[in-house]
């Protein structure tokens, strides 16, 4: 995950909204990240923002007092996402490059979320509001250059990079 813009990831207590990268989690100079959960990466967290981790990651639930920024800590890490497995279970599939803008109804319910799979890159073309409940897999890179708001439940898995560009 490569963050140049401003990202806020929130969950209602007692739930956490964790931010995880299968490779590096990079918060660049001029970027900011605020999450009501833990931050983790399979490799390392690179923080050039000047914002301390305890301000960036503030879990709603942390009864054991675990560190809020975790590098290669297997007890909290999900397995890396396999795009071919994600495609096999998807309710909605998009081959090639795709684009999101405006309001997108993901469908699904909280107990039975829809599964979306984007085989290639996913680009934002304008501000995006996601409704419904879904697990969204991006098989390549998600280029987020606009505001993204979710009014339901969203699990976002990006196989390669999530690039948050300045201004978002």
Image: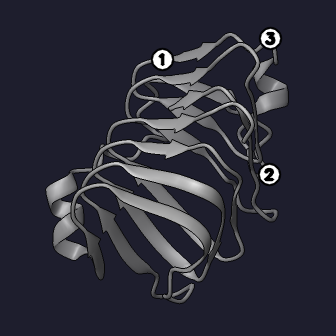
Q: CA distance from mark 2 to mark 3?
A: 23 Å
Determine the secondary structure under disc 2: loop
Side of 12 where 79 appears, left or right: left
Q: Residues within 10 Å of mark 2 (few under 14, many from 20)?
A: some
The relative height of residue 65 versus residue 159 in the rendered view (above or below) is: above
Determine the secondary structure under disc 1: loop
Q: Closer to the N terminus: mark 1 or mark 2?
A: 1
Image quadrant holding the C terminus, namely top right
Q: Nearer the viewer, residue 143 or 46?
A: 143
Check if mark 3's residue and mark 1's residue have beta carbons within 8 Å: no
Furthest residue in direction front, as rendered: 125
Query: Residue 116: x percent and y percent?
Result: 36, 72
Q: Point out which mark residue 34 bears.
A: none
Q: Residues within 10 Å of mark 1 (few under 14, many from 20)?
A: some
Query: Residue 153: x percent and y percent?
Result: 61, 73
Q: Point out which mark residue 50 bears.
A: 3
- Of tags 3 and 1, which is closer to the observer? 3
Q: Closer to the N terminus: mark 2 or mark 3?
A: 3
Query: Residue 123: x percent and y percent?
Result: 46, 51
Q: Write the residue at 59% across / 83% down.
A: 132
Q: Point out which mark residue 44 bears.
A: 1
Side of 158 where 163 appears, left or right: right
Q: Write the residue at 80% across / 39% down.
A: 58
Query: Residue 6: x percent and y percent?
Result: 76, 36
The relative height of residue 166 versus residue 62 in the rendered view (above or below) is: above
- Of tags 2 and 3, which is closer to the observer? 3
Q: Which color scheme does this rendered protein use?
A: one colour
Q: Point out which mark residue 60 bears.
A: 2
């Amino acid at each position: 995950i490569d963050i140049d813009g401003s990202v806020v990831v929130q969950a209602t207590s007692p739930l956490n909204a964790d931010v995880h990268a299968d490779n590096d989690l990079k918060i660049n100079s001029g970027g900011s990240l605020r999450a009501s959960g833990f931050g983790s990466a399979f490799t390392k967290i690179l923080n050039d923002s000047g914002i301390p981790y305890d301000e960036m990651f503030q879990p709603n639930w942390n009864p054991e007092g675990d560190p809020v920024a975790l590098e290669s800590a297997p007890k909290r890490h999900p397995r890396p996402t396999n795009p071919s497995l994600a495609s096999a279970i998807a309710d909605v599939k998009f081959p090639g490059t795709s684009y999101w803008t405006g309001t997108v109804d993901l469908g699904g319910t909280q107990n039975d979320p829809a599964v979306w799979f984007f085989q290639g890159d996913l680009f934002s073309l304008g501000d995006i509001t996601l409704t419904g409940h879904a697990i969204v897999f991006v098989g390549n890179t998600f280029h987020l250059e606009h505001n993204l708001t979710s009014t339901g439940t969203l699990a976002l898995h990006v196989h390669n990079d999530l690039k948050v560009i300045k201004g978002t």
